[in-house]
Image: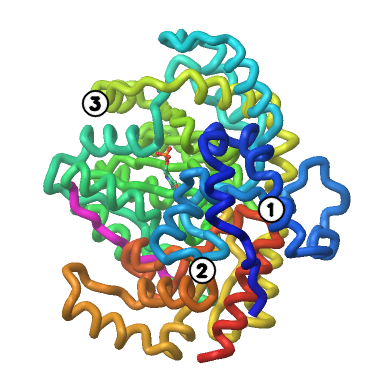
Amino acid sequence: MSRIGNLNRRSFLRGAGGAALLGAVGARTAFGEEVGRLDALAPGSTSVLSPFGRQEFDFDEIYDRRGSSCIKWDRAIERFGPGVEVGMGIADHDFRAAPCVTKALAERFAHENWGYLHRSSEFNEDVVEWNQRRYGLDIDPDGLVWTNGVHTAVIAALQTFAPPGSRVLMNTPTYNGFYTDLRFTRTIPEDSPMILVDGRYSIDWDDFELRAQRSNAFILCNPQNPTGNCWSEEDLLRMGEICLRHRVPVLADEIHCDFVNRGETYTPFASLPDRDIVNNSLTFKSSSKSFNLASMKVAWYFSTNRDYRERVQANSRSTVPTLGVFANRAALREGEAWLDELLDYIDGNHDFAEAYVRERLPLIEYTKAEGTFLAWLDVGGLIDRTRAVQTAAQESTTSVATVTATQVVQRWLAENAGVFLNPGSDYGTGGERHMRMNLATSRRLIERALDNMEGALATV
Ligand SMILES: Cc1ncc(COP(=O)(O)O)c(C=O)c1O
């Protein structure tokens, strides 16, 4: 089994110190020496694995985030120990930020005053122009509401439409964070399990309609985290029509919309050619996935239905941070070339992972996702071979919470392959035999993770 290994974590963490917390600019100098050593451990793989020719931005670089208080790496290591070599959990990136973002933040830092922010209407124009330019989507700038995260806004929408004790419809498997929002609002998940055929998910329409009838809101995820589904106009219209008929508002979370693989299409719910269906919805967006700005806490939502929008607004008093606004503006105004190259790179990562899994990991299956930077791996073979269901049942007898088979697989992979993945059971009904792997990282690290998994699987 190949291993990155050899990293002197204690001196690395000491070196990272406070400078690491300042982010990418400070991190490179503070981490430089150790990161250099890490790079040197995977020589020569860059050119082999970069099918897109010369790139302006180096996404192959292994940008070491360890010791910077990031969930993706530091929490995985905290949980499973220093043997975790590749953290592939929470949905953010390992890449160095877009240069325009770093520049804008440095310039704003030079102005040493951090009083209240005045957000002029120009900020709305940046979002409007981005959506118009990339997706042909018209958003009324006056109807755009800023919020400090998609969660904050989704929670406000749930509080508006779904009183405690009522049900919220979702196509599952779906983003685990929605379940947290439901717990927060004391609403009940109404999982409508999708149908899985040959690695592709589709909607069970009878089930969807049955459950819509008893739900107060529908959370749509497009592209869908974790499956990567990019919903077609036809599917969206059909979901929208059912929800309209049963008076169920559609909460369209389109945070992953920029990540669409070659040959696939993202259709904004708000662009559907039916005014009544669109009026029955709110859309939630952000550039936090596209430009890796999650900790900057900026997002926005909009609706053609003024009544919906104002009612949700009344349930949330959310302000956005100055640095977040400056970072987002720079990204939307100047970051398009960086993002387009990143999208090509992620598309290549999906191809790479799909081919590797097919050729070298017989106990796992992966069908390339249509969108997102997430790979939804079918680990049914691994579950069976390692008897994870039996282990989970046994452990559940002495555990406060039920232990699932994919949690057992998560631990097994962390301990035997040094790879941290998210267990499918976190994503609702239908996730019981899958693991989620985050591909927003250097292809060299993906290769390392898959090499490690191949080595570990050979022992079972
Ligand atoms: C589908 C989806 N919605 C929302 C979020 C979180 O959004 P925010 O950080 O803006 O609250 C995530 C993060 O992974 C996500 O995948």
Residue topped by disc 1 = 62
Query: How far is the residue under mark 2 from the one under mark 3?
Result: 45 Å
Q: Work out whether residue 307 can be spotted.
A: no
Instruction: Give me the residue at 51% from left, 22% from top.
Output: 323
Badge 2: how crowded within 10 Å, few (<14), some, or many (20+)? some
Quarter occupied by the N terminus? bottom right
Residue topped by disc 2 = 83
Instruction: Give how far across and how far down residue 223 sits, in percent.
Output: 51, 50
| Badge 1 element | loop
| Badge 2 element | loop
Which disc number belongs to residue 315? 3
Q: Is residue 228 left or right of residue 283?
A: right
Badge 3: how crowded within 10 Å, few (<14), some, or many (20+)? some
Q: Is residue 411 above or below residue 207?
A: below
* Cβ–Cβ under 8 Å for marks 2 and 3: no
Q: Please check the rendered image and state whether residue 193 is part of the magenta-colored stretch, yes or no.
A: yes
Q: Is residue 285 left or right of residue 244?
A: right
Please name the amino acid that badge 1 sits on.
Ile
Please name the amino acid that badge 3 sits on.
Asn
Q: Main secondary structure of the magenta part?
A: strand
Q: Which of the 4 quarters of the picture holds residue 278?
A: top left
Q: Which residues are magenta?
A: 187-195
Q: Please check the rendered image and state whether residue 51 is part of the magenta-colored stretch, yes or no.
A: no
Please name the amino acid that badge 2 sits on.
Gly
Q: Earlier in the sequence, mark 1 or mark 2?
A: 1
